[in-house]
Image (cartoon, helix red, strand yellow):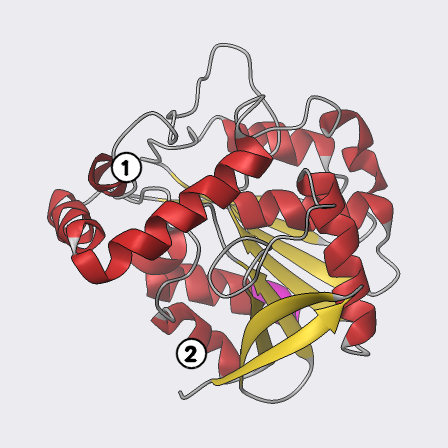
Amino acid sequence: MPFVAQSIKVNGAAVALKRAGAGEPLIFLHGADGLAEWPAFLDDLAQHYDVIVPDLPGFGASPCPEWIDDVSDVSYFYLDLVDALKLSDVRLVGHSLGGWAALEMAIRSCEKIRSLALLAPAGIHVKGAPKADIYMIDPDQQARLAYADAALGEAAAQRALASKHQEQAILNRLASARFGWSPRLYNPRLSRWLHRVRAPALIVWGDADRIIPPVYGPEFAKFIPGSSLKTIARCGHLPHVERRAETGQLVLDFLRG
């Protein structure tokens, strides 16, 4: 499904976004690698919803204002984006870093958030369960780690090495490090406030995730009231890519419910 590229100002800062579909609003927040290409998973969602996909500050075509320092700033920024777009009853779908941002939004205000679907979100730390250090490994190595299927991982690694992606990948990595460098991909205070998530939440995890281990799924479910956890077999850190059909069905069933 074709998307339309747009730009909107939020507090004087430009936000690049892509939009497809029609219906009630759904915002997809991408992970730490950004969104170089429009995944087919979003086409599936756009069959039913008005899918809005912003580039997080510093990623893609969105510059990062100097006054955005961490994911808590990003969360306020995106709550303001919801207001700027005049949206309500928003379904948030967030992957990895984007899932973390969605949770930071929800603990501050669920007034305009109808639900959260979280795909292997970052944001907390489980003692004894280290994440992959995505800032200390090469992009092609990270791509291999992101998939359970070795063939898919190798194909992703070759794409990561392609010259047309390298410049943007470097910029995205710098933006990701700005938000997730220290401590690595989590907010030490987030877990104590997850009880404030008032919207229904679905957590989806691949059982072979080597970026953020599957043990994080039950930990999130423990902290988020009334949340449900679904595990996908033979799946790595990108359930919406590696297991598109299964993940899409889980998310759509949740959103419809």
Can I make out residue 243 in this image?
A: no
Which class describes the residues within 10 Å of circle 2: few (<14), some (14-19), or many (20+)? some
> Gap in Å between the C-alphas at discs 2 and 1?
25 Å
Residue pointed to by mark 1: 142
Can I make out residue 169 in this image?
A: yes
Main SS class of the magenta portion in the image? helix
Seen in the picture, residue 68 relative to 194 is either above or below; the reply is below
**Magenta stretch contains residue 254:** yes
From the top left corner, tell me how far across and down residue 56 is, in percent: 58, 56
**Magenta stretch contains residue 124:** no
| Kind of residue at disc 1 | Gln
Left or right relative to 137: residue 182: right
206 or 50, nearer to the observer = 50
From the top left corner, tell me how far across and down residue 213 is, in percent: 42, 28
Stretch of the chain drawn in magenta: 253-257
Seen in the picture, residue 4 relative to 62 is either above or below; the reply is below
- Which mark, residue 43? 2
Location of residue 19 by image quarter: bottom right
- Asked if the residues shown at circle 2 and circle 1 are in contact, with their CB atoms under 8 angstroms apart, the answer is no
Seen in the picture, residue 17 relative to 122 is either above or below; the reply is below
